[in-house]
Image: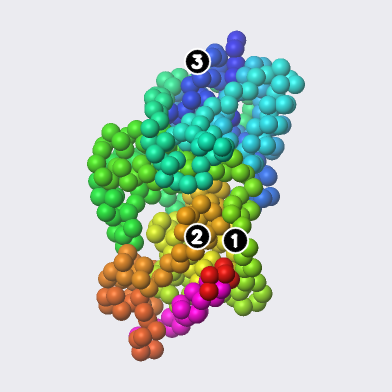
Amino acid sequence: MRRAVVLFTGDLRLHDHPPLRAAVAAADEVVPLFVLDPAVARVGFAAPVRQAFLAGCLADLDAGLRERGGRLVVREGDPVTEVCAVAAECGATEVHLAAADSGFGQRREDRLRDALGAAGCRLHVHDTVVTAVPPGALTPQGSDHFAVFTPYFRHWSAQRLRDTLPAPRTVRVPDSVRSADLPAVPSGGQAAGGERAARRRLSAWLRGGLGSYDTGQDDLAGDSTSRLSAHLHFGTLSAVETVHRARAAGGPGADAFVRQLCWRDFNRQLLAARPSVSLADYRDRHDRWRTGKAAEADAEAWREGRTGYPVVDAAMRQMLSEGWMHNRGRLLVASFLTKTLYVDWRVGARYFLDRLVDGDVANNQLNWQWVAGTGTDTRPNRVLNPVLQARRHDPDGAYVRRWVPELAAVEGPAVHEPWKLPEIDRKGYPQPLVDLSEARARFQQARGLG
């Protein structure tokens, strides 16, 4: 009886899953395994909103496997120890998993390879499980990664993606392998996790919002983005399948959406080549970020959505309420923290990881660096003016009124400049933390531009 183990990580699905398909093809019985790693909590990555979404993903994965005659095996502890234990218990000769791009995942993979090799068990690492194009597959001359998006996008677009794989019809799991209980799925609250919910959302998006994505993606009030980011983060959707289906739909909206999927791969290839950029500046701008009581008070006002700039506060309050924020909002609040308040990007990135259901090391940290000017932006010193951005992307103020109830009665674009209103109309909404012109001058001086 040939047996194999499939270690699920950020790929919690059955459709288009190369490690699972390979294991089912190679073995008579397969152990689909997920390990609840306490190290995730120790490094501060176990945000409650993501733990709740993860519980839904695992429950849905287990249900899908049971429909195919199997089940999900859950263990708790060090992944290397638990994988080796499961392999020994069932007599598995091979283990399959998706390739990692973070330093954390790469170290786990190296340890697993060594430990399994010592036990006579082979490790198979599969590419294009989490990304459409593997990190490292595309490199410019003289470097191990692309540092500029446009040439990367050009090369990425020319790649032929592998075909999408169907979900296996049957997954036979040995009865003897014990499992811990699945994490409890909280009732109510945030959006449900799981492959079935992901596939329904993708299908609805392709039928509806995709067609106008090129013109509506920055419309804050219109909420015209896919909201697939959490499903891509947890791997309940395949990036390969998502690109294929978007391209099949065609049109300018699909082209713009696929470009965003490429941006996700771009960040992952950068992180895979330079794991240190999860905490260290990719490009050192010699910033001397503000610290001390005044800077912390400003950062706390930013976290709570009371900066006095309504579009910034609306976006922050959306995240506090939903565990999600519109992409244009993310750009605005990140620019405000790092360039208007001149507070270290790591402060903002940490808070995002604490609050976002789609909190992802590659996209979160590197997007923060892009906005802060320490990453790959070719215009590292651009500053987004929150008033001008609000007028452009929330012209009549509907987004602000939705999330800033103090200003709900203020009609039209006047809501973006409440400091010009009588105090009675502001309903206690705070005055601006900082004058934008003074803040811009401070940033330019700090960067040696003034």
Range covered by the magenta-colored residues: 425-445
Tell me the quarter of the picture where residue 193 sits: top left
Q: Amino acid at mark 2?
A: Pro
Is 390 above or below relative to 158?
Answer: below
Q: If you read the primary sequence from the N terminus, does the residue marked by circle 3 or circle 2 appear first?
A: 3
Q: If you read the primary sequence from the N terminus, does the residue marked by circle 1 or circle 3 appear first?
A: 3
Is 449 above or below relative to 86?
Answer: below
Q: Amino acid at mark 3?
A: Ala
Disc 2 secondary structure class? loop
From the top left corner, tell me how far across and down residue 401 is, in percent.
34, 71
Query: What residue is shown at x 41% (from left), y 62% (from top)?
Result: 329
From the top left corner, tell me how far across and down residue 414 is, in percent.
31, 79
Crowd around label 1: few <14 · some 14–19 · many ≥20 (10 Å): some
Q: Is residue 310 left or right of residue 19?
A: left
Mark 1 vs mark 3, foreground winner is 1
Q: Is 443 one of the magenta-colored residues?
A: yes
Q: Are marks 1 and 3 in contact (CB under 8 Å)?
A: no
Disc 1 secondary structure class? loop
Q: Is residue 168 left or right of residue 88?
A: left
The quarter of the rendered structure image containing the N terminus is: top right
State the separation of the CA atoms marked 3 and 2.
49 Å
Instruction: Provide the residue designation for mark 1.
Output: 285
State the separation of the CA atoms marked 1 and 3.
51 Å
Task: Please say whether residue 321 is visible from this viewpoint.
Answer: no
From the top left corner, tell me how far across and down residue 35 is, in percent.
62, 36
Query: What residue is shown at x 59% (from left), y 52% (from top)?
Result: 282
Instruction: Provide the residue designation for mark 3.
Output: 25
Tell me the quarter of the picture where residue 420 sits: bottom left
Q: Are marks 2 and 1 in contact (CB under 8 Å)?
A: yes
Instruction: Provide the residue designation for mark 2.
Output: 380
